Amino acid sequence: MSHGRTCMYNKNVPLYPFGFGLSYTSFAYSDLTADRNTVSVRVKNTGDRAGDEVVQLYFDSTCLDNQPMFRLVRFKRITLAAGEEQTVVFDLDDRCFTLFSDEGKEIFVSGTYNVYAGGSLLMERSLVLGTTPLCLE
């Protein structure tokens, strides 16, 4: 996997990043907070019509040796009316902090993680397409 065959390690720029979807409205993210057990983020429908958003939670453990650039650890689909806001809470467990070794063994990886929440994977292409993720480092 670490040879770029999955989106977690691939350094090529895709046409559309993982998790990216088009909508008839727009969403803004704010107030990202995290502790060992939960992550919460506020999502607002900033458009003029109702819409669904898939709120995605990513961990980046690249500060650790030979780790993925990012990992989708949780997601939730929400529906918001125009102008409506909602705080989305993600519960964390030990599986959020585990990775698979080259031998396929699941291992707990302690260390410092960067936390990202948004409507798609955080990468430059996402920003060009209009995604506005939040980051906690």
Image: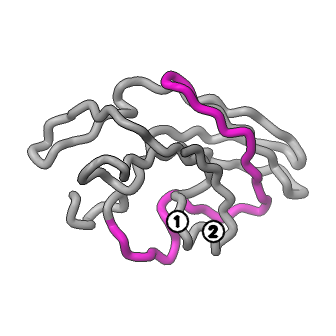
The spot of residue 73 in percent (x, y) is 44, 40
Residue 97 falls in image quadrant: top left
Neighbour tally class for label 1: few under 14, some 14-19, many 20 plus, Cα within 10 Å: some
The spot of residue 9 in percent (x, y) is 31, 61
Magenta highlight range: 10-38
- Rendered position, 6 above or below 54: below
> From the viewer's perspective, is 73 left or right of 8?
right
Q: Secondary structure at mark 2?
A: helix
Residue 127 is labelled as: 2
Neighbour tally class for label 2: few under 14, some 14-19, many 20 plus, Cα within 10 Å: some
> From the viewer's perspective, is 104 left or right of 130?
left
Residue located beneath label 1 in the image: 123
> From the viewer's perspective, is 31 left or right of 103?
right
- Tag 1 near tag 2, CB within 8 Å: yes
Taking the magenta stretch, the answer to whether it contains residue 14 is yes
Q: Residue furthest left?
A: 103
Q: Name the foreground residue: 78 vs 72.
A: 72
* Alpha-carbon span between mark 1 and mark 2: 7 Å
- Rendered position, 68 above or below 91: below
**Residue depicted at x 58% and y 67%:** 126
Amino acid type at image mark 2: Leu
